[in-house]
Amino acid sequence: MTDIAMRPGALVEARGLTKTFILHNQGGTELPVLRDLDFHVLRGECVALAGPSGTGKSTLLRALYANYKPQAGSVAVLHQGRVVDLARADPRTVLDVRRRTLGHVSQFLRVIPRVACLDIVAAPLTDEGLPRAEARERAGALLARLNIPERLWGLAPSTFSGGEQQRVNIARGFVKPCPVLLLDEPTASLDAHNRAVVVGLIREAKARGTAVVGIFHDEEVRDAVADRLHPMQPIGSAA
């Protein structure tokens, strides 16, 4: 637990977030990416991180998921009724927050060798104790909605196209409702029809009260789902 007080309705709130990368193979050069950044997202809200390449959007998303540890600041998440600071949490707590509270859809599927597509998508449900048959049924319904042919469900997705792998990744991220959902360019490799499906999934998640943070380079998708933008600028730029 932590003594950080979050604003009413917030499920995630970062304060004073600072992240600098040390380039050890370049003489210890320091590359500041985030400096004293404040950020929050409310229940049922979608906040889109906006700004040109190099402004720290992906770094912020990874800090919110505790993949990157900041040099300063806090990342407060409302987890099972208590506030957890992921910037200081131990690894076991971070894993528990990811399993129960913090969903994540990255740009790329981490292909698991020899594991069927259907089981990859169903895994978040079976990990929570849902019977395998029910978990696979839910996974199949979501794969069908994302236009993954049933003939592919029993295959490992290592040979799937980039767009198919991304849709499997999206299905895995959405199959279990989470209080917070982080999205890293979820529609980057998708056609218009499947982009519309993802827009529908995001809107449904928001309607359930999920707090969504996303990077959307597709402005049409961003405008369809975002309630507000969080503008980001390179360190040293004028506000």
Image (cartoon, helix red, strand yellow):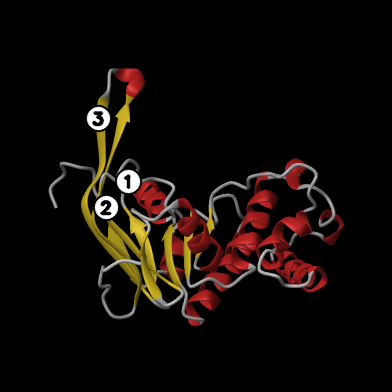
Q: Marks 1 and 2: CB-CB under 8 Å?
A: yes
Who comes first in sequence, dot 1 or dot 2? 1
The label nearer to you, 3 versus 1, is: 3
Residue on which the image places disc 1: 56
| Residue type at the position of mark 2 | Met
Residue behind mark 3: 30
The residue under label 2 is 232
In the displayed structure, 139 sits above or below 108; it is below
Q: Tell me where residue 7 sits by quadrant.
A: bottom left
- Under mark 3, the amino acid is Glu
Q: Which residue is drawn at 27% across and 52% down?
A: 232
Q: Compared with residue 239, is residue 220 higher up or lower down, i.e. above or below?
A: below
Q: Which residue is drawn at 62% across and 70% down?
A: 176
Label 2 element class: loop
Determine the CA span between mark 1 and mark 2: 7 Å
Image coords of residue 129 (percent x, y): 70, 70
Secondary structure at badge 3 equals strand
Classify residue 45 by image quadrant: bottom left
